[in-house]
Image: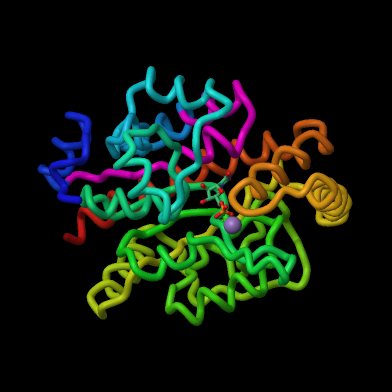
């Protein structure tokens, strides 16, 4: 696909031409990661957090076969309110474009489209990774896309429904820097103080340091990189409570035979129910915090280049 086949909003187009700070946002989080209406509200809050810092948000999805960069509020509302919208990861992009379908994009698919648009910074909640059940071989395409696409992903580590030590090992194998923002530990999404603690590959204290690492990594022929910060402490979930909800959700997934792309949304939804909505509040808070940090990094990157 050539870049001309992307639909880029006027605001994002103008910011890119001027070399201003732009932050990409994904849409699977909206359509499949959070329940309505928190999902729509979170999507707007993330965009507002980016604007408040002085950068331009670009929420990404595929609409009727067109990869769209910079969704309008009406387009975001449509994705947030339609429960049956497709989830497109990297492998699905060709099909949804060729068949003129509408799909929310995962981290992997959003990274690919952001790169085509020339956006270098992206914010999400927690990335995908290696699932806990090894027999399924379920390892998110997010990891492979992170390895090959030169976009900086700002997140709260990988989702706590995953096997985090294996996820981190795969990222190391793929040569993806995992930089901790004011932390030495790879965050476990909305769970804080999880054990064992997993080390990041480098630590920074400022957005400028983070931007400098990303720039050096890309100059050396590297692909993407991760900047991870801890979940805001006020909303974080204690590990023992989370473990019980996860075990129950995994049993339910097995009982009804949920696998593949449906597994992550299923587990997140069951855990949200079991927690009485606490994980939804935490997920919302960490996404907005990541959007804000991503905007600061995008500004630092714009100053460097
Ligand atoms: N971050 C969140 N909630 C989410 C996701 C990320 O806080 O729902 C989504 C992202 O789109 C990510 C996807 O790419 O979950 C992972 O799906 P899978 O495990 O099927 O690759
Ligand atoms: Mn998967």
Check residue 124 for magenta coloring.
no
For residue 90, side relative to residue 248 (left or right): left
Q: Nearer the viewer, residue 127 or 56?
A: 127
Location of residue 270 (image quadrant):
top right
User: Left or right of 280: which side holds 9?
Assistant: left
Q: Is residue 174 visible?
A: yes
Q: Please name the residue shown 61% across and 34% down the image.
A: 34
* Rendered-image quadrant of the C terminus: bottom left
Closer-to-camera residue (124/149) = 149
**Identity of the residue drawn at 33% across and 38% down:** 99
- Residue that appears at 60% across and 39% down: 33
Q: Which residues are magenta?
A: 20-43
Residue at 29% across, 42% down: 98
x, y percent for residue 124: 49, 47
- Visible residue check, residue 241: no
On screen, 16 above or below 167?
A: above
Residue 73 appears at what percent x and percent y?
A: 38, 20
């Amino acid at each position: 696909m050539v870049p001309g086949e992307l639909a880029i909003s006027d605001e994002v187009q103008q910011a890119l031409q001027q070399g201003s700070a732009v932050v990409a946002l994904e849409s699977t989080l909206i359509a499949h990661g959070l329940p309505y209406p928190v999902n729509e509200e979170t999507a707007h809050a993330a965009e507002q957090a980016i604007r408040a810092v002085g950068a331009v948000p670009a929420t990404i999805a595929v609409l009727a076969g067109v990869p769209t960069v910079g969704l309008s509020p009406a387009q975001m509302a449509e994705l947030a309110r339609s429960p049956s919208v497709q989830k497109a990861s990297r492998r699905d992009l060709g099909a949804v474009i060729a068949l003129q379908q509408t799909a929310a994009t995962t981290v992997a698919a959003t990274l690919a489209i952001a790169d085509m648009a020339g956006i270098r910074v992206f914010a999400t909640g927690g990335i995908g990774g290696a699932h806990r059940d090894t027999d399924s071989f379920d390892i998110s395409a997010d990891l492979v896309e992170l390895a090959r696409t030169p976009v900086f992903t700002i997140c709260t580590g990988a989702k706590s429904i995953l096997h985090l030590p294996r996820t981190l090992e795969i990222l190391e194998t793929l040569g993806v820097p995992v930089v901790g923002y004011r932390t030495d530990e790879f965050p476990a999404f909305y769970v804080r103080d999880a054990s064992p603690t997993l080390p990041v590959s480098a630590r920074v204290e400022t957005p400028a340091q983070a931007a400098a690492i990303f720039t050096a990594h890309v100059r050396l022929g590297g692909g993407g990189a991760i900047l991870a910060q801890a979940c805001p402490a006020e909303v974080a979930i204690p590990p023992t409570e989370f473990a019980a909800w996860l075990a129950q959700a995994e049993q339910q997934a097995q009982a009804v035979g949920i696998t593949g792309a449906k597994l992550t949304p299923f587990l997140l939804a069951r855990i949200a129910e079991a927690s009485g909505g606490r994980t939804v509040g935490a997920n919302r808070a960490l996404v907005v915090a990541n959007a804000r940090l991503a905007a600061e990094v995008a500004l630092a990157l714009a100053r460097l280049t």
